Image (tube, rainbow, N blue to C red):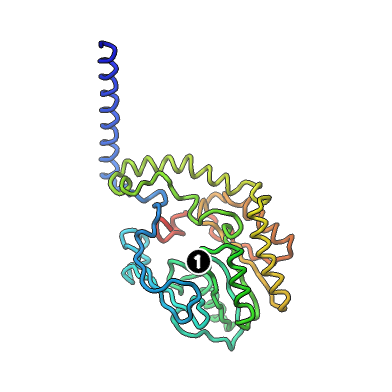
């Protein structure tokens, strides 16, 4: 009984000490206003999004709306519209500034890609493809960019979009905004998603959020980055099949005598460190081998802090 009593006493003392440490950590984090969402992905962020309208892709003259909670809007981007972002489509169901037709009497460029090129989460005037069109027009270079990007798609899905529209919309060029998960299998927020971020605990305990975030940063995140920068990914059947889809797009455009260009886009993680340079290099070399023209934008945000490129902490 004596040994059992001492063991129980030591266990109780240890648990009390741990509890005291957690209380002190919780108090300190709250005093210094360390946010629960500062360092890592919120699991299932779309539970916070209020949706209105039909978000089926390629509906002509459609308007779909999403409202994000302003408590996550650390840059104040959504505040002017009270959290509301509108997604309008033109006569082809491609994204546009309003539910109206685009001009086809000037050179037309078909634009392909996933949510990055679509400009998901952004007012369309702030999407990079619209800003490129505006910059050209400011230099008296008239063009209509028909943005046929599809949210959540990959290279094979984007190929199907192009094959569907290539003979329906007269065009003079094709521009494909390629994000690396169009070819490599992972969700856009894979690196920063934290499986330890249990919503109720994160919402109610800064201490838990802080510990979960540190474990994620130094263990889970590093492991996932190693996965995505491993040269072996270029030998996987998944990569080869997705690359074949890009090659098929380029060949289909060539058969029509239409220039086909790829813009290689950066992943918004570790921008200061050049972490994904081996992955970009491998993709660019693969495109070069197939004679596909590529504008390499993968380093255009080098030196940025990651959070400066995210509108929301779970972006």
Above or below: residue 101 compared with residue 28: below
* Residue bearing the label numbered 1: 151
Above or below: residue 56 compared with residue 302: below
Quadrant hosting residue 212:
top left
13 relative position to 65: left or right: left
Q: Nearer the viewer, residue 303 or 281?
A: 281
106 relative position to 85: left or right: right
Residue displayed at 66% across by 64% down:
245
120 relative position to 53: left or right: right
Percent of width and height locating residue 201? 31, 45
Percent of width and height locating residue 262? 64, 67
Percent of width and height locating residue 8? 27, 19
- The residue at the far bottom in this view is 105
> Label 1: few (<14), some or many (≥20) within 10 Å?
some
Residue displayed at 57% across by 54% down:
185
1 relative position to 130: left or right: left
Q: Secondary structure at mark 1?
A: loop
Above or below: residue 177 compared with residue 23: below
Percent of width and height locating residue 226? 57, 44
- Tally of marks: 1
Quadrant in the picture for the C terminus: bottom left
Quadrant in the picture for the N terminus: top left
Q: Nearer the viewer, residue 300 or 167?
A: 167
Residue displayed at 58% across by 82% down:
143
Residue displayed at 72% across by 61% down:
288
């Amino acid at each position: 009984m004596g040994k059992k009593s001492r063991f129980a006493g030591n266990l109780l003392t240890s648990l009390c000490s741990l509890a005291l440490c957690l209380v002190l950590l919780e108090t300190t984090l709250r005093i210094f206003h360390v946010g629960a969402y500062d360092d890592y992905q919120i699991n299932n962020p779309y539970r916070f999004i209020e949706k209105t309208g039909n978000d089926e892709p390629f509906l002509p003259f459609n308007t779909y709306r999403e409202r994000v909670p302003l408590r996550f809007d650390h840059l104040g981007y959504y505040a002017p519209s009270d959290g509301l972002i509108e997604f309008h489509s033109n006569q082809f169901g491609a994204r546009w500034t309003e539910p109206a037709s685009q001009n086809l009497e000037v050179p037309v460029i078909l634009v392909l890609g996933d949510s990055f090129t679509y400009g998901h989460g952004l007012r369309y005037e702030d999407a990079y493809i619209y800003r490129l069109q505006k910059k050209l027009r400011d230099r008296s270079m008239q063009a209509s960019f028909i943005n046929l990007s599809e949210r959540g798609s990959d290279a094979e899905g984007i190929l199907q979009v192009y094959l569907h529209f290539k003979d329906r919309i007269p065009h003079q060029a094709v521009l494909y905004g390629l994000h690396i998960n169009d070819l490599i299998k992972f969700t856009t927020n894979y690196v920063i998603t934290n499986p330890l971020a249990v919503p109720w605990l994160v919402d109610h305990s800064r201490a838990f959020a802080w510990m979960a975030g540190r474990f994620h940063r130094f263990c889970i995140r590093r492991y996932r980055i190693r996965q995505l920068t491993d040269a072996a990914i270029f030998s996987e059947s998944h990569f080869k099949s997705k690359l074949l889809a890009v090659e098929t797009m380029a060949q289909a455009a060539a058969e029509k005598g239409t220039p086909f260009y790829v813009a290689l886009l950066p992943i918004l993680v570790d921008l200061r460190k050049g972490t994904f340079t081996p992955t970009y290099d491998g993709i660019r070399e693969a495109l070069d081998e197939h004679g596909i023209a590529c504008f390499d934008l993968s380093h255009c945000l080098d030196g940025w802090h990651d959070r400066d490129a995210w509108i929301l902490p779970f972006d």
